[in-house]
Image (spheres, rainbow, N blue to C red):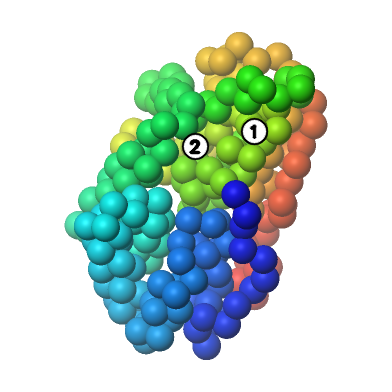
Amino acid sequence: MNLPVGYFNFHKDAFINYQLNRWYSLGYTRKTDIEHVGSRTKTFADYVAAFTQLAEESVAQNRLKNAAFYYRAAEFLVEPYDKNKLPLYDQFRDCFYRAFAEDPIERHEVVYAGSYLPAMRLPANPTSDRKKGTILACGGFDSFIEEFYCMWAYFAAAGYDVIAFEGPGQGAALRKYGLPFDHDWEKPTGAVLDHFGVLDATLIGVSMGGYWAIRAAAFEKRIKRVISFPPVYDWMELAG
């Protein structure tokens, strides 16, 4: 798939504009829809309502890829203890896995700390010239493994066996299994490597996951290479 290129002025507020560009850049939303949300948003509540409406309309029109990422966008700005947050998350995942039902996605639950870590495996494209190894991948502070599917699918098509996982504090690891963040990222990384029997992997970390990937590689010797983009290591510096 061809991903959008560029950074657009969807909203005058820098934070809202960043989030709108975030969803658009992943390739599963329509630019006119993002512009529509931008034009209707004055408050976070406006943003949530606009994306929820777009998601419902997309479901009605069987545009499940759009629907999934509109539910995800809506969920993002709902407060953690709001009663609507978990239903929006569930709708996001339901639409996502229905939309990509024909893709060779394997869903796994990795035993960890008396609970589970969700993982997604995409086997290397069998028509690729040669298998190039295993990529382990994780997102950042507020991301889900499904959110970066465009990247995971790209690497699998290029001949890599891709395993994306949610560590403690992320996605379903937090929402479904109650696991809070754990600074020692080599622990969940090691559990995922054990589950899949991987002895040599490249670890990709996105955003805060970029920092965790470097941390994990320092202690987990089965991680031989790291791609960190970017290594977000100091939230106070970013906030300041």
- Label 2: state its secondary structure: loop
Residue 1 is at least partly visible in this image: yes
Task: Give residue 73's position: percent from left, percent from top.
Answer: 40, 62
The mark that comes first in sequence, 1 or 2, is 1
Horizontal side, residue 86 vs residue 115: left or right:
left
Q: Residue furthest right?
A: 225
Q: Where, quadrant-wise, is the C terminus in this rendering?
A: bottom right
Quarter of the image where one finds residue 234: bottom right
Rendering coords of residue 32 (x, y %): 44, 75
How far from the left and from the top, in percent, is residue 26? Answer: 55, 56
The answer to whether residue 238 is above or below residue 184 is below
Which dot marks residue 166?
2
Residue at mark 1 to residue at mark 2: CA–CA distance = 22 Å
On the question of residue 189 being in view, the answer is no
Task: Give the vertical position of 71 relative to 150 (above or below).
Answer: below
User: Residue drawn 34% across and 33% down?
Assistant: 177
Q: Could you tell me the amino acid type at mark 2? A: Glu
